Amino acid sequence: MKSRIPALFTAAAALAMTAWSLTLPPDAITRPKPDSWPTFHGDYSGRHYSPLKEINAGNVHNLTLAWVNQINITPGANIGGSGPAPATSGFANTRCAPLMVDGVLYVTEPNTVLALDARTGREIWKYTWRGLPAFALGNRGVGIYGDWLFFETYDNHLVSLDIKTGKERWNKELADVKRDYFSSVSPLIIKNHVIVGVGGDFLDVPNFAEARDPETGDLQWRFWTTAHEGDAGFKTWPNKNAVEHGGGGVWYPSTYDPELNLLYIPTGNANPVMAGQSREGDNLYTASVVALNPDTGKMVWYFQYSPHDTHDWDAAQTPILLDATIDGKPRKLLAQAHRSGLFFLLDRTNGKSVLTAPFIEGLNWYKGIAPNGQPIRDPMKEPQVSGALTSPNSNGSTGWPNPAYNPDTGLFYVGASQSYTIFYKTDTDPQPEGYSGAERGGGVVKTELRAIDVKTGKIAWKHATNIGAQSLLTTGGNLVFGSDGSGDFIAFDAKNGEPLWHAGLISNPSNAPITYMLDGHQYVLVAGGENLYAFRLQ
Amino acid sequence: MLSGVRLDKRIVFAGGLALFTMIAMVEAQPPAAQAPAPGRGGGRGSRFKIYSAEAIERGLPAYNSTCGYCHGERGKGGKAGPDLIASVVTLHDEDGVQLAKYVRDAEHSKVAKIDASDAQMADIAAYLHSRVIYASGRGNVRMAEVIVGDAKAGELYFNGSGGCNKCHSPSGDLKGIASKYDSATLQDRLVMPRTGRGGFGRGPIASNPTSPYATVTLASGEKIKGAPLRVTDFDVTLRLDDGSTKTWARSHGVPKVEITDPLQAHIDIMTTLSDTNMHNLAAYLATLK
């Protein structure tokens, strides 16, 4: 009886919480309030578009710095995990999209979550994870369900924190770090599901996405991105061993259509990365977008961008959900500028191709586009022992830094590069391991910010920059916020690409810029390495 | 040869002919027991413990005699045992302790009894861990197999449609080039001689004549040349010939900045060169010893 009282109390409290006063009720993500940025993408659509227009093309020249904060990752009072003590100092390198809810910003580094006061940038609380050595390039941010935060540590733990205090509620191991799995994705909250994923492509592991219970962290379902036995995609692998070494990392935030109740997960490339001889076939569902029912984890459709990939071209770019009229008919669409240099427009109800077009010049790795919209790969442009001069390089024509879509202009904005490299296969063993390939030589011919007309796939405008892939934000003020790769944070005219405003930062913007209303004013927030900058009209 | 392992009879029978094949395979495998080669060691980040070359060298024969029969060449898995590279047991092991415990427990002993000592298990572990590090890296280009083209066709291309002879000569700047570079570097450099990702250096003009240079045209019409340290929509900074730097603010493309790349011909080649011509050219250059 004694043990039941707290349980009853907790249940009653939870019921009360769901009725009112939650920091971010799950259904609030469907139609985000203008004073919030509640997911990595700002909403479920992945557009990185805000209708806010207090800051607009006519007045953006008056945008000024409201505050700047150097992100301090020195561990504080809240510490979780049982690994070695974290370094007591070090520089942050912010790759997340901060979430903003109720005047508080939530920022992540691979082993740190910070709550910052959105009015001042000052720290409210900090949580540090003590993990095991792992690949820790970046972290995309938190997910919020009610008063609970969710964070994936670089060594594959899902941590839930109390949003008010940063105290750990629980943590769950998602994958074995000793197998070289790593995690970087921001959890996505859909109803009572915390959608998470793991990656890793150094030791040929199979990867997966999962739904976890927000209250307990328990597994609800798991989707293997390499089609296991019993799945129709299994026949695109030669055998079970290849599937179990097949890659397909889930290291990029997904998007979701609440009306269709479909979750769109972009998947990583196949493994071994650059030698395909032990995995003949298309290798589903790597380098693809898969549409799942988020309640069951069952796949409804898939589309593979890079069949049998051998160039490290994952599909870890945003599958942007947009609606447009094509040939006189309103369509529910999904647009993705893939790392391989091709822009894909799909019908997001069924995954059928609407158009496929290159968004950069010079691509030489495919022979043509099949009637189903997929590229027909050229086997001679796979890595060769003697070298294959290929465009683009393994970094791709674009990458994980997010593109943006503006429904006012109908344009899809993406940072792009034209690059070349020589891919060498280094492992000719029937069972190659790991990368099994190298790239050398070549170079980058040009880097540009490009605007793609989604209806035609044609380039509406382009603007030379010193950076290829870059994270973008577009707004109802006819603006695109991005950078030039040389430390400048820039507002471009969304219609023609003309730079209208810029601020020279200490280092180049490194994350997805966000925008929100606070105390009646629109703010634009961006990180440059270890510093966070908030801009507004004064 | 199989002194360290006593096999379950069922597996020996089931193996049949495969037994001899596998013994031959283990015998014939290349000497993989060496410290991870440069370029493939450690993958991204130093997440793996590095063991001594001596321990790894002792580990190879110990692995072959104790584990290789079932787990195959270089630990990649055989018909009677799983892959030991992507093995949870190996990956959680440190110094052979966990591996020794695993192979001595009842489950493993049911199929194969392992008699190896703790020291032998530590060596086997060192060898397997070296294989994990190897697998997590990228591997080395197989230099002896890069030159596959037709040197004669390469020479024709060099002097013909490739237009290489407009700037280069086998008896001049390319004399002895094949002795200077390994085969892959030779091939990489014929495509783009500038090294480094991106390929566009920003050094002073005088110190590197193949670096791009910029010409800034001022409102007065004066043209100033220098190494472009920074070119954006909002400013341009050049390193001038005297070593000083100069910055101008820019707006709407004024002042005008033109970049000239002495290696433009290579950029043009890079964007159009076929693999056949690349391989033929590499074969031709490889004759210029």
Image (cartoon, helix red, strand yellow):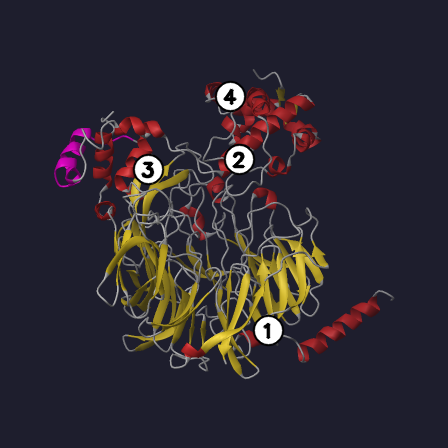
Please state which of residues B122 and B257 is positioned toward the viewer in this rendering: B257
x then y, percent, for residue B18: 48, 23
* Mark 4, residue position: B19
| Mark 1 Cα-neighbour bin, 10 Å: few <14, some 14–19, many ≥20 | many
Q: Please state which amino acid type lies under the numbered disc 2.
A: Ile
What element does badge 2 sit on? helix
Give the Cα separation between the discs numbered 4 and 2. Answer: 29 Å
- Up-down relation of residue A331 to residue A88 (above or below): below
As for residue B149 lying within the magenta part, the answer is yes
Number of the front mark, 1 or 3: 1
Query: Marks 3 and 4: same chain?
Result: no
Q: Chain of mark 2?
A: B
Q: Please state which amino acid type lies under the numbered disc 3.
A: Gln
What element does badge 1 sit on? loop
* Mark 3, residue position: A384
Quadrant (top left/top right/bottom left/bottom right) for the N terminus of chain A: bottom right
Bounds of the magenta span? B147-166
Q: Chain of mark 4?
A: B
* Mark 1, residue position: A118
